[in-house]
Amino acid sequence: MASRRNETEGVYFRSNRLFAVNHDWYFATREGENKGPFKDRNQAELALAAFIARCISEGDSHSVATRNGDGNEVLNDMVEEARDLMQIIQSHGITRACVWAYDRIRSLRGAGHKTRHPLRRIAVIEHLLNSH
């Protein structure tokens, strides 16, 4: 098995991070911590994307799968949007981030937009704004 960047050679167990217990949804971190509960899979996935983006923006590359590492294209796209929004919040503040988010959502909803998974990207932007 190929190693992820910054990972030593060895055998690593990789699995889907999302799981349900008694109708509640959770996600697991690489350190074995479970985050949740969330009311549905969608909310758990949004929280996971936000969690991964936070780890990346804080420089904690050990806690997250790299863009090429987890093979989940939709999640990678959501993390990309979340990371962009978090960077704007950190560098310019929440007011500027809200303006950026409004413009970005309008762009994603635009006719003929070529971005992959626009609805999931919009959902993670809205999730992050609601959590601030």
Image (cartoon, rainbow, N blue to C red):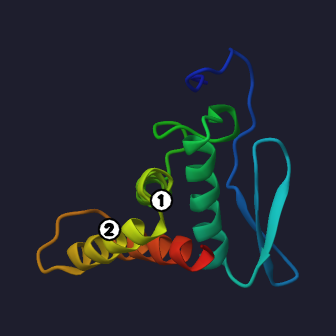
> Circle 2 sits in a helix, a strand or a loop, which is it?
helix
Q: Residues within 10 Å of mark 2 (few under 14, many from 20)?
A: some
Considering every residue shown, the one lying at the far left of the view is: 112
* Rendered location of residue 36, percent (x, y): 80, 70
Q: Quadrant of the C terminus?
A: bottom right
Amino acid at circle 1:
Ile
Q: Is residue 125 left or right of residue 119?
A: right
Work out whether residue 107 can be spotted: yes
What residue is rendered at 54% in x and 70% in y? 128
Q: Residue at 63% across / 45% down in the picture?
A: 55
Residue at x 64% of width, y 67% of height: 47
Q: Nearer the viewer, residue 45 or 89?
A: 89
State the CA–CA distance, disc 1 to disc 2: 10 Å
Amino acid found under the numbered disc labelled 2: Trp
SS for dot 1: helix
As drawn, is 22 to the left or to the right of 93?
right
Neighbours of disc 1 within 10 Å: few (<14), some (14-19), many (20+):
some
In the displayed structure, would residue 63 be above or below residue 49? Answer: above
Q: Is residue 13 positioned above or below 128 on the image?
A: above
Residue 27 or residue 127, whichever sits in front: 127
Q: Residue at x 88, y 82 (%)?
A: 22
The part of the image, by quadrant, that contains residue 74 is bottom left
Q: Is 41 on the left-hand or right-hand side of 108?
A: right
The residue to which callout 2 is attached is: 100
What residue is disc 1 on? 89
Quadrant of the rendered structure where residue 131 is? bottom right
